[in-house]
Image (cartoon, rainbow, N blue to C red):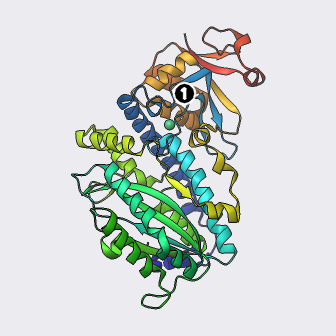
């Protein structure tokens, strides 16, 4: 987003309102609900593809392993219901269900540093760094080159001079991978935290120009690529809530509806490639998705410099692993229980039942879920009260269950 666009967004936010437009608010609420459901369906479809491609790896077993009983649990924030009692994979790259939780938490961590630094009178600058690449190349090779060029950019005496000149405290580096007409395109969104202003083009103080020069030089020197001049190093100051929001959406900390749109023309997000592969079974998209998942496995999407941590401390989620963040369940009450055997059938179904069941509960409660499961799985799905384990042994229900109203569904 350009500085002009940021300014425009800021002005739009600060416009004076004549009063609440209830029709618009209602429409927005409906769209939000639909959007959340659509995201959930699309994410579940992609998780099914992962299950098919990697049946024995953690990303392929997400949502399959379970405790003795599985529940739908309500959020205390009124955001609907979701599954609890299942084991998740925690992949920030490859699993849309887990990534939505993990990325949201990591996004909040980044926001923590931006807000603290701006509050203290500092400057935050977003630097997007790219290099040339082609279809003939492996994602791993391009990814490694981009990271090497950044490591070289931020080392040595010339970098130390920039640190002193602009009072650079440290960076937060986020990696994003998109897919365009030249194949996979890993690139960096770097937030630079500094104390002195970035200056103007052509003056003695010109952070944007200095960064472009250095990135271009290091890409030329340490890789077989080019930095694509101005396009290869885009520099934008971040200020105010509109600027922070623009950054958040640019780096995709939260999966938005836009991430799931199919766009054959131009660049697609990695999620779009996966969703297209899951929806159409297109061989090229499946090959591309496999390459992406395997190339990103074990890599860190986000790095916060130790200088920033030393200066501002760190949010509590920083020390929580992606796996543990994804495993955090809703904080509201359990509203409907399922025997393990019935959940296995739901999870294994090809008709996205693991998405449709919570959606049906949100729309029509217990009876709508019951009708759905009787139609899709078996007429023998029945309501069980006080007997929610496969073997009907009440004593094996854990304490939380024992204290909750035991309304459950079972396949008999
Ligand atoms: Zn997962």
Where residue 180 appears, as percent x and y from the top left, is 29, 57
Helix, strand or loop status at disc 1: helix
- Total tally of numbered discs in the picture: 1
235 above or below 92?
below
**Which of 347 and 208 lies nearest the eye of the viewer?**
208
Residue 88: image quadrant is: top right
* Residue farthest right in this picture: 403
Q: Where's the N terminus, which quadrant?
A: bottom left
Badge 1 local density, few (<14 within 10 Å), some, or many (20+)? many
368 above or below 152?
above
* Residue farthest front in this picture: 157
Q: Is residue 178 visible?
A: no
Where residue 262 appears, as percent x and y from the top left, is 33, 51
Residue 341: image quadrant is: top right
In the rendered view, does 5 fall on the left or right side of 53? right
CB at disc 1 and ligand 1 closer than 8 Å: no
- Residue lying at 39% horizontally and 63% vertically, measured from the top left: 149
| Residue that label 1 marks | 369
* Residue farthest left in this picture: 136
Where residue 187 appears, as percent x and y from the top left, is 39, 60
14 above or below 101?
below
- Residue lying at 46% horizontally and 16% vertically, measured from the top left: 378
Q: Where's the C terminus, which quadrant?
A: top right
Residue 333: image quadrant is: top right
- Residue lying at 62% horizontally and 57% vertically, measured from the top left: 109
**Which of 134 and 332 lies nearest the eye of the viewer?**
134
- Residue lying at 33% horizontally and 39% vertically, measured from the top left: 290
Q: Is residue 244 visible?
A: yes
């Amino acid at each position: 987003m350009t500085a002009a666009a940021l300014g425009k967004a800021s002005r739009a936010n600060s416009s004076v309102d004549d009063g609440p437009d209830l029709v618009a608010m209602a429409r927005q609420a409906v769209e939000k609900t639909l959007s959340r459901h659509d995201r959930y369906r699309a994410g579940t479809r992609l998780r099914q593809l992962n299950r098919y491609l990697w049946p024995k790896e953690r990303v392929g077993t997400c949502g399959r392993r379970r405790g003795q009983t599985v529940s739908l649990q309500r959020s205390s924030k009124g955001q609907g219901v979701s599954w609890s009692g299942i084991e998740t994979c925690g992949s920030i790259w490859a699993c849309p269900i887990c990534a939505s939780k993990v990325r949201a938490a990591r996004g909040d961590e980044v926001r923590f540093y931006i807000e603290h630094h701006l509050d203290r009178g500092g400057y935050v600058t977003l630097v997007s760094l790219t290099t040339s690449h082609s279809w003939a190349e492996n994602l791993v090779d391009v990814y490694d080159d981009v990271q090497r060029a950044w490591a070289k950019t931020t080392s040595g005496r010339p970098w130390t001079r920039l640190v002193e000149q602009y009072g650079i405290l440290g960076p937060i580096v986020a990696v994003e991978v998109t897919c365009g007409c030249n194949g996979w395109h890993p690139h960096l969104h770097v937030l630079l935290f500094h104390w002195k202003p970035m200056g103007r083009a052509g003056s003695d103080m010109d952070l944007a120009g200095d960064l472009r020069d250095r990135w271009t030089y290091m890409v030329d020197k340490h890789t077989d690529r080019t930095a694509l001049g101005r396009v290869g190093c885009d520099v934008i100051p971040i200020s105010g809530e509109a600027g922070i929001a623009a950054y958040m959406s640019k780096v995709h900390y939260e999966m938005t509806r836009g991430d799931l749109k199919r766009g054959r023309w131009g660049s697609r997000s990695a999620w779009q490639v996966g969703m297209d592969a899951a929806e159409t079974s297109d061989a090229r998209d499946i090959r591309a998705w496999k390459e992406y998942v395997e190339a990103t496995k074990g890599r860190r999407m986000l790095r916060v410099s130790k200088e920033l941590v030393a200066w501002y401390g760190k949010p509590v989620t920083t020390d929580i692993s992606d796996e543990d963040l994804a495993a955090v369940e809703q904080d509201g009450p359990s509203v409907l229980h399922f025997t393990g055997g019935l959940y296995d059938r739901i999870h294994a179904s090809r008709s996205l039942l693991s998405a449709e069941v919570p959606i049906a509960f949100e729309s029509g409660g217990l009876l709508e879920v019951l009708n759905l499961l009787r139609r899709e799985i078996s007429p023998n799905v029945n309501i069980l009260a006080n007997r929610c384990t496969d073997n009907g042994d009440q004593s094996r229900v854990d304490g939380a269950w024992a204290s909750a109203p035991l309304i459950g569904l079972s396949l008999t």
